[in-house]
Image (cartoon, grey):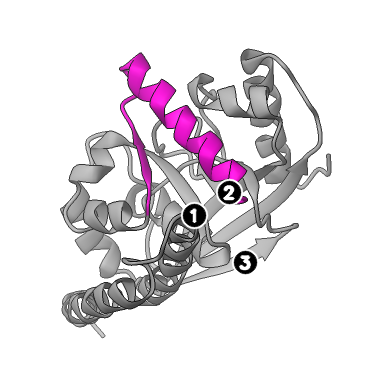
């Protein structure tokens, strides 16, 4: 199958899946009451993520203990990160506010209960940390990407972790897990065609990715046992823990 035919077929499948997702959301999450709504949205996102990963031809090698609750800290490479992690475990994601404006994906992210943060506004970060505390108190798994942006590193390098979203980890001492992601393409360079960074434009990037034969994700999980009361030190230790997953060192 040529790239153009593959893209056309996958776009049709994508549109059909979006319609199915909307119906699924309406019947399972839209009217879920109170505290159960967050869990219903996370479960809906998991089902939707699994369907859409198949359209991208994406499969995953998963290693380590998959968390069911608490805070999950991960490196960040692409919008596929959210689908890949959500497909493994129902979760609430924290994302930069710009994602809310992405075509279709932003709308789906909002339906899933994603917490959007404007990092340049301190009041926004404070409100987001309050939502993170609420989700953790409800027993949800909350995923944050402390690099603050996706990068071309493809897991080989991880940007320094920002501290702003780590306040609930310091104050509330939830269970913390870490994850490391890496991608490979069967017919291309994942650093440019999966990783979403720099001057990439969202929609053209998605179209190009839909033209690739298949994507292979490697996802490693680990438990973070330390309890640290300083955000800067916690950010440094978490960064080291993610990098240790890359090298396969147990901690």
Q: Can you identify the residue that label 2 sits on? A: 138
Could you tell me how far apart the alpha carbons at marks 2 and 3 are, in whole angstroms? 29 Å
* Residue 178, image x, y percentages: 66, 43
Image disc number at residue 61: 3
* Residue 175, image x, y percentages: 72, 41
Range shown magenta: 113-140
Please give the name of the residue rendered at 39% of the width and 76% of the height, measured from the top-left corner. 51
* Residue 245, image x, y percentages: 71, 44
Residue 2, placed above or below residue 220: below
* Residue 121, image x, y percentages: 31, 17
Residue 104, placed above or below residue 4: above
Asked whether the residues under the numbered discs 2 and 1 touch, taking CB atoms below 8 Å apart as contact, a structural biologist would say yes
* Mark earlier in primary sequence (2, 1): 1
Total count of labels:
3
Q: Would you say residue 154 is visible in this rendering?
A: yes
Q: Local crowd at mark 2 within 10 Å, few (<14), some, or many (≥20)? A: some
User: Residue 188 is drawn in which quadrant?
Assistant: bottom left
Q: Is residue 178 left or right of residue 86?
A: right
Closest to the camera, between mark 2 and mark 3, is: 2
Closest to the camera, between mark 1 and mark 3, is: 1
User: Residue 30 is drawn in which quadrant?
Assistant: bottom left
Please give the name of the residue rendered at 42% of the width and 31% of the height, measured from the top-left corner. 128
Q: Can you identify the residue that label 1 sits on? A: 35
Could you tell me how far apart the alpha carbons at marks 2 and 1 are, in whole angstroms? 7 Å
Please give the name of the residue rendered at 42% of the width and 69% of the height, measured from the top-left corner. 44
* Mark earlier in primary sequence (2, 3): 3
């Amino acid at each position: 199958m040529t790239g153009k035919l593959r893209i056309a077929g996958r776009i049709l499948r994508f549109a059909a899946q979006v319609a199915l997702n909307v119906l699924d959301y309406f019947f399972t999450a839209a009217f879920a009451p109170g505290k159960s709504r967050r869990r219903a949205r996370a479960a809906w996102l998991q089902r939707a993520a699994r369907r859409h990963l198949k359209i991208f031809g994406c499969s995953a090698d998963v290693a380590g203990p998959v968390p069911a609750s608490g805070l999950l800290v991960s490196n960040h490479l692409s919008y596929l990160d959210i689908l890949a992690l959500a497909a493994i475990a129902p979760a609430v994601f924290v994302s930069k506010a710009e994602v809310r404006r992405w075509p279709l994906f932003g709308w789906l992210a909002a339906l899933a209960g994603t917490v959007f943060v404007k990092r340049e506004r301190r009041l926004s970060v404070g409100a987001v940390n309050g939502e993170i505390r609420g989700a953790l108190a409800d027993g949800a798994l909350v995923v944050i990407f402390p690099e603050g942006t996706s990068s071309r590193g493809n897991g080989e390098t991880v940007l320094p972790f920002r501290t702003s979203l780590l306040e609930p980890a310091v104050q509330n001492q939830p269970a913390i897990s870490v994850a490391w992601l890496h991608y490979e393409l069967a017919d291309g360079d994942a650093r440019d065609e999966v990783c979403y960074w720099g001057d990439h434009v969202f929609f053209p990037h998605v179209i190009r990715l839909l033209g690739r034969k298949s994507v292979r994700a490697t996802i490693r999980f680990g438990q973070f046992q330390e309890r640290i009361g300083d955000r800067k030190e916690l950010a440094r230790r978490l960064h080291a823990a993610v990098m240790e997953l890359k090298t396969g060192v147990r901690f």
